[in-house]
Amino acid sequence: MCATLIAAAAGGCSVSKKTAVAPADKPLPVQTATKDELVARYNNQASAITSINASVSLKLTAGSAYSGVIEQYHEVNAFILAQKPADIRMIGQAPVVGKNIFDMVSDGTTFSVFIPSKNKFITGPSNFERKADKPIENLRPQHLVDALLWAPIPEHAPVLIEEEISGAKRFYVLTVVRPGGHGGVVMGWEIAHRIYFDRADLSVARIETFGSEGALESDATYSGSIAAADSTYPTQIVVSRPEEDYKLQIDVKKVTANETVSADKFVLKQPEGTDLVRVSDAPANPPSAPLSPSQELHPQQ
């Protein structure tokens, strides 16, 4: 009788149903390490690579889901020469024909860019931060240097450790903090970096860099590995800059590390007959250095 009433209340005959549930991701084998071991591991790798000479491909995405505009740009071949603390030279070439579409150099203080197709030579301070209307025009040389060549964790910097789980993957996360405040007045602490180690092999998988008051400046992810000097170097680097609203994917095809680099490699002189553009003197939305070369990366139709 009770069974009949229950079936009636359910709207008909009682039928047993089985719902297939996808099994949870199987945890992968993990390695263990202490905070001090991870700090030493990171600092050893950061100190092991002081310069790189790499052939790469670049893929730039401007815009985000938040801005409502996402533009995918064609892949561009490039050569990157970078040396600590802040020197970088990057030459971008059109696919197939191998024609230079930009030549950019920066010493961390000033930058210069030559764009043959525009007959323009652009120069200005490396810390030039006037935001352009187009996200793609906010790319800066120093953004690349910071992602390509890591700075070691300062010796006495406070560091916290935690574990993070994402699907089947597990990470150790080191949070590096620094004194906060404004105008030289120290007020508490703020996050400087969060460094993620893949517990499968303890490799650095991600580095988040924060500005004042916890603003996320850069989110760089690393994958793959290639021998470089007495260390290794990632084969793919993806740099996301939320404030500038762009993402740059760097696929490393070939790299050599710690070669002796002469100073003249980081000197770019203005070719005769080109138009000089100084971004510090430009109007509100200038085609600043890394921006202008990016204008050569035509959106896919």
Image (cartoon, grey):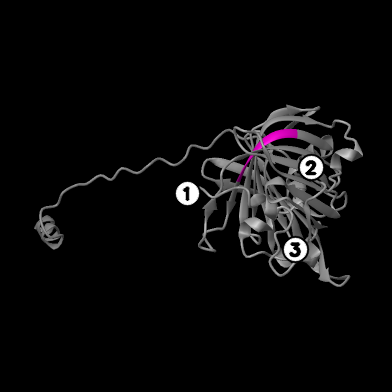
**In the rendered structure, which disc, 2 or 3, sits on the residue that comes first in sequence?**
2
Give the structural element (helix, strand or loop) at label 3: loop
Question: Foreground residue, 191 or 62?
Answer: 62
Residue under pointer 1: 301
Position of residue 126 relative to residue 116, above or below, is below
Examine the image and state in which quarter residue 80 appears.
top right
Residue under pointer 2: 89
Residue under pointer 3: 129
Mark 1 nearby-residue class (10 Å; few <14, some 14–19, many ≥20) = few
Examine the image and state in which quarter residue 132 appears.
bottom right
Question: Foreground residue, 221 or 170?
Answer: 221
Give the structural element (helix, strand or loop) at label 2: strand
Is disc 2 in contact with disc 3, using a CB cutoff of under 8 Å?
no
Instruction: Kindly identify the amino acid type of the residue bearing the numbered disc 2.
Output: Arg
Instruction: Kindly identify the amino acid type of the residue bearing the numbered disc 3.
Output: Glu
Please provide the residue range marked out in magenta.
54-59
Is disc 1 in contact with disc 3, using a CB cutoff of under 8 Å?
no
Give the structural element (helix, strand or loop) at label 1: loop
Residue 114 in view: yes
Considering every residue shown, the one lying at the far right of the view is 263
Is 276 positioned to the left or the right of 12 in the image? right
Mark 2 nearby-residue class (10 Å; few <14, some 14–19, many ≥20) = many
Question: Disc 1 versus disc 2: distance between alpha carbons?
Answer: 30 Å
Position of residue 140 relative to residue 283, above or below, is above
Examine the image and state in which quarter residue 123 appears.
bottom right
**In the rendered structure, which disc, 1 or 2, sits on the residue that comes first in sequence?**
2
Give coordinates of residue 185: x percent, y percent: 87, 72
Mark 3 nearby-residue class (10 Å; few <14, some 14–19, many ≥20) = few
Question: In front: mark 1 or mark 2?
Answer: 1
Quarter of the N terminus within the rendering: bottom left
